[in-house]
Image: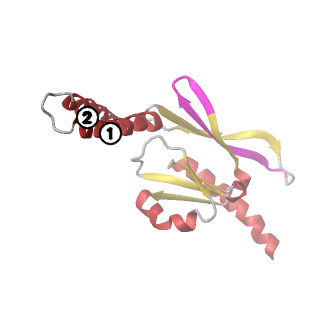
Amino acid sequence: MYAYTSNGSRTSLHLIVIAALSCAILLFSASSAEGVPMPWVFQLAGIFIGAFGVYMLTRYSLRSYRYEITDTDLVAADGQRVLDLTVTQATGRKLTVVCRVSLRDVTAVNVLDRASFRRQKAALCAGLTLFRYENTPFEPLSCYISVPEERSLLAIPADEGMARLLREAAEANAAPAGEAEE
């Protein structure tokens, strides 16, 4: 129905990975030079910086995600089609479905930048666990999807079309609850 992939230029991320791994190699090389006082300090710093580079490489640089709204071929009691939000992680040739949520369970959708999210984190995450399905830590905007039925808050890169469809689903889910209270 609707899908997009989290590809794109991640030059700054790749530069950070290259710089961290190069710095770790330089620190280990410097620690083996003759006359260096306390070489273990250089080695320890090299281990920490190298671990950071490997983390950034495996967590962000080598992964990509595909976000799609799919039809489940099920029909709800009210006659509406049941749609799912599916997040598929690609690492090399390996594809793994890491998240599948029914749009019937989505109650709120917020598109926020990191600073706004930090300010509103307590209200957004109240009792929910945050799951980030993004492949860059420098994404300017993220779409936060509240799924209280699963006790989760999903974070995906903001895509205008996806955010619109998810907001429509959240509004449709809020309407029956409002009618039931009357």
Q: Amino acid at mark 2?
A: Cys
Taking the view exactly as shown, the residue that stands out farthest to the left is: 35
In this view, which residue lies farthest toward the right?
77
Image disc number at residue 23: 2
Q: Amino acid at mark 1?
A: Ile
Q: Which mark is residue 31?
A: none
Residue in the picture at 47% in, 59% down: 112
Quadrant of residue 89 in the image? top right
26 in relation to 72, above or below: above
Disc 1 target residue: 49
The verdict on residue 77 being magenta is: no
Left or right, 102 with respect to 10, comes to right
Give the dominant element type of the magenta stretch: helix, strand or loop.
Answer: strand
| Residue 13 visible in the picture | no
Locate residue 17, reporting x and y percent. Answer: 34, 35
Q: Quadrant of the N terminus?
A: top right
Secondary-structure class at tag 1:
helix
Q: Please, is residue 86 above or below residue 90 in the view?
A: below
**Dot 2, how many residues are within 10 Å of its Cα: few (below 14), some (14-19), or many (20+)?**
some
**Disc 1 and disc 2: Cα gap in Å?**
7 Å
Relative height, residue 166 to residue 86 (above, below):
below
Density class for disc 1 (Cα within 10 Å; few <14, some 14-19, many ≥20) is many
User: SS for tag 2?
Assistant: helix
The one nearer the camera, 150 or 169, is 150
